């Protein structure tokens, strides 16, 4: 059994993962409205991944005999200035999530909870990947600038993500 502090902390992380899914779903539909189905698809897949992260933590809490308590999910933004600012927003959100996961990992260390430290390693690696893929898209978007043709090319490319 985990300490109550760890259980509470993991419950908060479940909320962050569900909020991430909610935010990315909001971004998905901002792109849908703009007719950019590829960008929308990218965020749809991303939202789905965040749901699997939440599930992973739920399974872990259950395995360790803890109790899952779901909290209210905050309202995400639903409007952005342009494509680049959507991705900058998602990057800063992921950086926040990364810092929280690092914090939980430090807490696990303080609590001498080895199992949680090991469990969190997967999330630490996952955060590197997520920040990296968003950074790559941001780099590409900066290169593209205001080119409509290049934007549609990129949209077609992002439609491939599954
Ligand atoms: Fe996540
Ligand atoms: Fe994420």
Image (cartoon, rainbow, N blue to C red):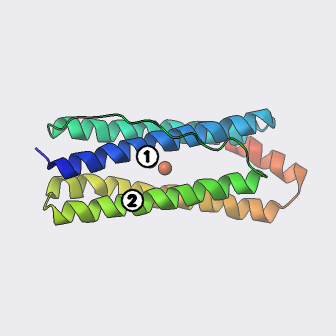
User: Does residue 55 appear to the left or right of 97 in the view shown?
Assistant: left
Q: Report whether residue 162 is seen.
A: no
* Residue behind mark 2: 100
Quick one: 150 or 116, which is closer to the camera?
116
**Residue 15 horizontal/vertical position (percent):** 40, 42
Query: How much space separates mark 1 and mark 2, taking CA atoms?
Result: 9 Å
Q: Does the residue labelled 1 lie within 8 Å of ligand 1?
A: yes
User: Does residue 10 appear to the left or right of 113 in the view shown?
Assistant: right
**Residue 92 horizontal/vertical position (percent):** 57, 60
Residue at coordinates 21% horizontally, 60% vertically from top-left? 108
- Mark number displayed over residue 133: none
| Residues tagged 1 and 2 counted as in contact (Cβ below 8 A) | yes
User: Looking at the image, how many numbered discs can be counted on the residues?
Assistant: 2
Quick one: 59 or 12, which is closer to the camera?
12
Q: Report whether residue 100 is seen.
A: yes
Image quarter of the C terminus: top right
The answer to which quarter of the image holds residue 24 is top right
Q: Residues within 10 Å of mark 1 (few under 14, many from 20)?
A: many
Secondary structure under tag 1 reads helix
Residue at coordinates 68% horizontally, 61% vertically from top-left? 138
Badge 1 or badge 2: first in the primary sequence: 1
* Residue behind mark 1: 16
**Residue 31 horizontal/vertical position (percent):** 74, 39
Q: Residues within 10 Å of mark 2 (few under 14, many from 20)?
A: some
Secondary structure under tag 2 reads helix
């Amino acid at each position: 059994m985990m300490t109550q502090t760890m259980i509470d902390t993991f419950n908060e992380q479940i909320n962050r993962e569900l909020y991430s899914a909610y935010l990315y779903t909001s971004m998905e539909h901002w792109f849908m409205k703009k007719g950019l189905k590829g960008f929308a698809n990218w965020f749809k897949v991303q939202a789905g991944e965040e749901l699997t992260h939440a599930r992973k933590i739920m399974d872990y809490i259950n395995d360790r005999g803890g109790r899952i308590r779901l909290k209210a999910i905050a309202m995400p933004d639903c409007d952005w200035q342009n494509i680049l600012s959507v991705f900058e927003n998602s990057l800063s959100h992921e950086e926040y999530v990364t810092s929280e996961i690092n914090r939980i990992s430090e807490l696990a260390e303080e609590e001498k909870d080895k199992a949680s430290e090991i469990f969190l390693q997967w999330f630490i690696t996952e955060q590197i990947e997520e920040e990296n893929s968003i950074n790559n898209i941001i780099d590409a978007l900066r290169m593209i600038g205001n080119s409509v043709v290049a934007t549609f090319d990129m949209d077609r490319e992002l439609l491939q993500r599954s």
